[in-house]
Amino acid sequence: MRLGMVIDLKRCMACYGCQVSCKAEHGTPPGVFFARLVKREEGNYPTTRQLFLPVLCNHCEDAPCVSACPTGASYYAEHGIVDINSDICVGCRTCMMACPYGNRYFHGEESYYFGEAGPTPYEEARTERHPVGVVMKCNFCRHRLAEGQEPACVANCAAKARTIGDLDDPDSDVSRLIKERNGFTLHPEAGTKPKVYYLE
Amino acid sequence: MSSKRYDQLIADLRSDYRPQREWGEGRGILMVIGHFLTGVAGGTWLMASIFGVPQGLFVAFAAGVLGGIVHLLFLGRPERAFNMVRHVRTSWVSRGFVGLGLFLMGGGLYLAIITLLPPGGVWNLVAIVAQVIAAIGTVTIIGYMGFCYAASKAIPFWNSPLHPAIYIAFALRGGIAALLVVAVPSDATTGDSLLRLWIGVTAIIVLLLLIEIYGAMSRGNVAARWSARDMLAGRLAVLFYGGTLTLGLIVPLLLLLGTSAFRPPVVMAFIGLASVAGDFFMKASIVKAGVYLPLVLPLRRQGA
């Protein structure tokens, strides 16, 4: 089984729901965004348009972050999910330079959203998941998948723009959507075989 | 994360060309210093071995030790550094870590033997083994940095096949420059040979850099073009023109031309120091110029 995700850009309304729900699920520290929305303006007045692109770890099949990692902290988990073992990571950040999608973040120091006021009870409850001095990234919410739930960004997408499923199963929703709507990946030229597809 | 750094990150994430700041800014400058010292260590050991300059071996070893310490200080979790021996098969950082370890072990043992023990006997054999280990380490630390950058798919400016050659040349130039500082006062003949070599390697570096920058500007990815522009006419121009070109190239050349008839050792030493400083600024410029591949839809989709 190869777990993949499809993001329908026609459905996406750039509400930041994925980014916020991911923050809420993982309680990631300030400056760490497992899922985020890229907004970009293109063209020159008057022919301009705004592009929205929700991004997250692409869980590549040939993940350059895994081969660049000197310790084996970045690894392929079940169903091809790329994850980080924070007990081994040394915080060299080589993986961040290897990832063509820029979806890895270094958690350098303990920090909280309300600064000197310290952690909120919510942040306190989540902090132990995030050791300091290591790199962090999306893991398709493995803990939720293990309980039979969808990743937070999928479950909380108001427009139902996100679908997760088995790319090896030709009858799965993701395979069908990719085939019917000609799904594409970001930076295919990097040769990393990403498993997050986009539809337009 | 301080609010200033947070605001910086948010601004970076919003920009089309997000600069990499993890290697090169804040504590990240330790990575640049570590790579610089390690390169100088490898180059100096090699040159000192070729020219038979024992002082050079000591300088190389000291630079290697310092480089190793600085690398450790850069890591988020230095206490786990030994984990880095685990992925030699695929990771250049891992190979560099093992290479530096071999260099320090072999080099340290060799220097201890030639310094503390009388020549002859079984220690001669141990010294040869130590030299071989140090040589393997030397070759690795001279080579790994360029490959490490070239394997960075996120940063198109580094992701160039020329990068390893440039870093190897920098290591050699650093080694020659270090010998100009430590060896010349005692030996004028060696000094002249070193100067000729310095001119040759510098010419190769200038050529390689010109090809790399021209390649980035003409055929490179948009992010590579942005990096090259940043270095030549943007936020890193002062570092590049002031540090790399003036200090690393023009000052040594002026010293060379101005003293063509007779070069006192102190001038040789200044040439070496200026050259080493220039190399540091060049490496810092290249690292800081790195910007991430922009996240855009494939071209065929953009017009859709």
Image (cartoon, coloured by chain):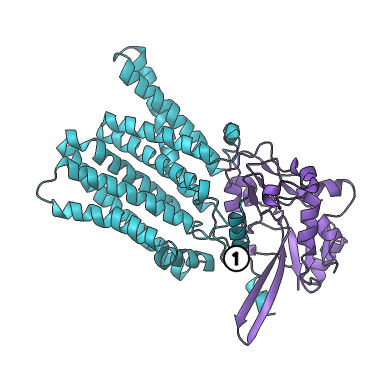
Figure quadrant of residue B61 = top left
Judged from the image, the secondary structure of the residue bearing numbered disc 1 is loop
Question: Is A69 on the left or on the right of B138, as rendered?
Answer: right
Q: Is residue B253 above or below residue B299?
A: above
**Residue A29 seen in this snapshot:** yes
Front in this rendered view, residue B108 or A27: A27
Pick the quarter of the image with the C terminus of chain B: bottom right
Question: How many residues crowd mark 1 within 10 Å: few (<14), some (14–19), many (20+)?
Answer: many
Front in this rendered view, residue A152 or B133: A152
At horizontal 60% and vertical 33% (from top left) the residue drawn is B80
> Horizontal and vertical percent for residue B177?
28, 43
Instruction: State the residue position of label 1.
Output: B294
Instruction: From the image, state the color of chain B.
Output: cyan
Question: Is B80 on the left or on the right of B184, as rendered?
Answer: right
**Residue A166 seen in this snapshot:** no
> Horizontal and vertical percent for residue B262?
10, 46
Could you tell me how many numbered marks the image carries? Answer: 1
> Horizontal and vertical percent for residue A158?
85, 67
Q: Amino acid at mark 1?
A: Pro
Figure quadrant of residue B204 = bottom left
* Chain identifier for the purple-coloured part of the image: A
Q: Is residue A53 above or below residue B7?
A: below
At horizontal 57% and vertical 52% (from top left) the residue drawn is A97
In the displayed image of the protein, which residue is found farthest to the left? Answer: B261
> Horizontal and vertical percent for residue B294?
60, 65
Front in this rendered view, residue B14 or A65: B14
In the displayed image of the protein, which residue is found farthest to the front? Answer: A117
